[in-house]
Image: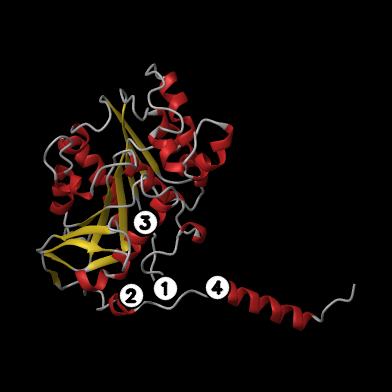
Amino acid sequence: MRRMPVAVTAALALSLLGACATTPPLTPEEHRTMHPTPSTPPATPVPEQHVRDQAYVAGGDDAHTLDLTVPGGHRGPRPVVVFIHGGGWEGGSRALFESTEGQNVAALRDALHRRGWATASIDYRLSGDARMPAQLHDVKAAVRWVYSHAGRYGLDRERIAVAGESAGGHLAQLLGTTRGRAAHEGRLGPLQGASSHVVAVVSYYGVSDLAAVVPDRVRAGCGRGSAGRSSPEGKLIGADPGAEAGAKAAAAASPITYVSPESAPTLFIHGRQDCVVPHAQSERAAEALRRAGVATDLVLTDGGHAESRYYATEDMQRKAVDFLATYLDPPADGG
């Protein structure tokens, strides 16, 4: 076979790489809102701000919406904690983050604001409307929106963390373990010059390994519970996670699949009596991260699934805030 000259081969390779790297131009809305103002100088007070029902994908689905709160009285760009609600990927709402009823997640929200951190609570497409990886693409787009609008709202785009509960904990973990992997970004929302990088993850009783949820329940003495294609995990991927036909999709949707040294530092909080998502899920993920050399902490406590003690008690609030503080690195003046 006749070989092409090296120069020709190199030119062809560069041409192909350029074609593969081509991205669509920014929409007028994205162009207008990408870093609309310089980042807030350290000595400048950041005003209190409340943004509600903000679309994070221009012209996207109704679920592509977030709420943003920036506490006032603090100087310089503020760290941000993005919260992802649970609901088995088939229900729930970002409004949970402001609710004092039931789980009282608002108690955690208030603790984060007292620290001087901004918060964003996001919705995402549910499994009745879209299957994975749509949910991952949604939450990455939401983080990129926060990054892109940091200048406008006095946020620090280099200090964005994520927390989630149950199904939201699963998506928070995915943000952490797919960090830096371009293949998982999707094509929604701000892309050019934006980043979905999160500096830390807090997973409250989140799923880390879809195929192991039912076996973990059985081993914990909880029975099989909801299983098969009609289970929340099955609806998420459109297959039975425990069957051979669903194994590939279950692995692709599991945070533990992507654990690497580049994964984000993660705190797991889980109840020992949880029969919906057994604590073995968090134990296994924490061990995998540790083996990869990633800073990881695991807090097991008495409690079942989605209880208020995880958010409303001072001790549990402190565990989450102290862990996040290590990576959000508030200013020396206390933020």
Residue 196 shows in this picture: yes
Amino acid type of the residue tagged 2 in the rendering: Glu
Q: Nearer the viewer, mark 1 or mark 3?
A: 3
The residues bearing labels 2 and 4 have C-alpha atoms spaced at a distance of 19 Å
Q: Name which residue lies at 26% across and 69% down.
A: 150
The residues bearing labels 1 and 2 have C-alpha atoms spaced at a distance of 9 Å
- Which residue is under mark 4? 21
- Tell me, for residue 64, which label it has, or none: none
Amino acid type of the residue tagged 1 in the rendering: Gln
Residue 106 location (% of width, % of height): 15, 45
- Which residue is under mark 1? 192
Quadrant showing the N terminus: bottom right
Q: Nearer the viewer, mark 1 or mark 2?
A: 2
The residues bearing labels 4 and 1 have C-alpha atoms spaced at a distance of 11 Å
Residue 32 location (% of width, % of height): 29, 79
Q: Quadrant of residue 77?
A: bottom left
Foreground residue among 327 and 31: 31
- Which residue is under mark 3? 138
